[in-house]
Image: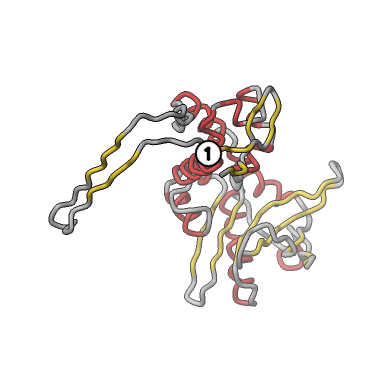
Amino acid sequence: MTFLLKSVHLFQGLTQKLELKRLPCSVEFKMLTPLNLQRFPFVILISKGIHTHPPPPLSKTPTCIKSELRKLIENSKEQLIDITAQQLVSGHLLKSVFGTEMVAEIHASLNNIDKLRYLIARVHNQQHPHGQGILGVVYDFYQNTKEIKNYIQKISFFNDGHIMILCMTNEQAAKCIEFKYFEVDLSFKRVYGDINELEFNAYEEKSRTIITFCRIFTNIATKEAYQRMFEAFFEIVEKLSNKPAHFRHIHSDGWIKPKPLD
């Protein structure tokens, strides 16, 4: 009986899908199982005969290779945040570290793609023990790490189910106060699920680019939710910039009326 091997193998310097032939072997295995496994939780395995085929290839990946793969994943957070094992294999990341794009050339054990999936999952679980959803964001926020603390300014949960996560840096708040107006955009959809992204932007003539001052991630777009988000936006702008959030038609200085884009 023959089988077609789905994984790619190296043969005479070329990558091919080779046939896997079954070799006959006269070794017999006998397993003795007690009638009462709960009372006697043991099994006896008896092997009789001599193997007439070569031993199977190594299935355990050396520690040094696993360590390099782990570093590759950990040092490429932005690119590998949602990467799959297939994307890792088909990209150029392996070549940059190991000098080859074929995992089979790194080690025979990596021919099993599940080993890469397992390693990626372990790294992701260590970096995001509570996942990459709302629970994961809340966990990272209360860990009070510098990169999170300086960007996520507020996380709020309300009785009507409204979730609000406001993101802004000190530099963004200071820049926001300098402009005469800002625009509000809810047309972006870069987050999976029910969460939407509310952006506060302005067009800068000097650089001819749109500058984003603040991002608020929310799951509800009711008038009550908008009121909460705008109040939070003004509160954080004043807190980070140490300047009042004024509107020209009310305070005679500050922003002109904001422009909704969506």
Report the residue that reaches farthest toward the left: 39
State how many labels appear: 1
**Quadrant of the snapshot with the N terminus:** top right
Q: Residue at x 63, y 52 (%)?
A: 243
Q: Position of residue 128 (x, y in %)?
A: 47, 47
Q: Position of residue 216 (x, y in %)?
A: 62, 60
- Residue 128 or 123: which is nearer the viewer? 123
Q: Position of residue 192 (x, y in %)?
A: 62, 60
Dividing the picture into quarters, in which one does residue 17 lie? top right
* Residue type at numbered disc 1: Arg
Q: Residue at x 68, y 23 (%)?
A: 12
Q: Is residue 130 left or right of residue 10?
A: left
- Residue 249 or 91: which is nearer the viewer? 91
Disc 1 on helix, strand or loop? Answer: loop
Dividing the picture into quarters, in which one does residue 238 lie? bottom right
User: Which residue is denoted by mark 1 in the rendering?
Assistant: 22
Dividing the picture into quarters, in which one does residue 45 lie? top left
Characterize the local packing of mark 1: few (<14), some (14-19) or many (20 or more) Cα atoms within 10 angstroms.
few
Q: Position of residue 203 (x, y in %)?
A: 82, 52
- Residue 234 or 136: which is nearer the viewer? 136
Q: Is residue 91 left or right of residue 151?
A: right
Q: Residue at x 78, y 68 (%)?
A: 262
